[in-house]
Amino acid sequence: MHVYLAGEIHTDWRDHIVKKCSDLGITFYTPVTDHPASDDCGVRILGVENNKFWHDHKSAKLNSIRTRNAIEKADVVVVRFGDKYKQWNAAFDAGFASALGKSLIILHSSEHQHALKEIDAAALVVAKSPGEVSEALRYVVTGTLPQDS
């Protein structure tokens, strides 16, 4: 199985999922989580821009190639909406994955339930923690339920 972990890049939520699912043979894809590298890839590769719009535009296009490729390869797309920043890229990723018919898992806190209700409606799973995502992936791959603790 191939899983793309999309969305919020400011916390280590991806690491928790990858670690908890390390025995399942899942191939994980991720965006570039080094924020300066993601923001500056366009000008570092294609040349300096004096206008911030074109600086951002170059990077957005390069990152879009990476994101589209990963979503197209994925069987499941997990999209996390974080608490601190507006996640416009996460909304795009969810919409693109949904349009391609990908199985979609949305991850966000309960406080964003109302704001994300349309995105949640497109998902097959809505989770509140990386642990819930890990257990959902484990169930999908193995058919086993978590042990009661």
Image (cartoon, rainbow, N blue to C red):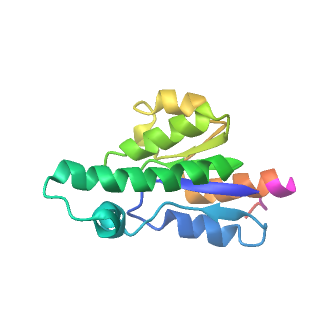
Residue 145 magenta: yes
Dominant SS of magenta comes to: loop
Give me the residue at 82% from left, 56% from top. 141
Q: Is residue 15 above or below residue 101?
A: below
Is residue 61 visible to us here? yes
Q: Position of residue 114 (x, y in %)?
A: 42, 30
Most extreme residue toward the right is 143
Give me the residue at 60% from left, 31% from top. 99
Q: Position of residue 25 (x, y in %)?
A: 78, 67
Q: Position of residue 146 (x, y in %)?
A: 77, 59
Give me the residue at 76% from left, 60% from top. 148
Q: Which residues are magenta?
A: 141-147
- Which image quadrant is residue 9 in? bottom left
User: Left of 112 or right of it: where is 133?
Assistant: right
Most extreme residue toward the front is 47
User: Left of 84 or right of it: where is 18?
Assistant: right
User: Left of 105 or right of it: where is 7?
Assistant: left
Give whichever of 54, 85 is nearer the camera: 54
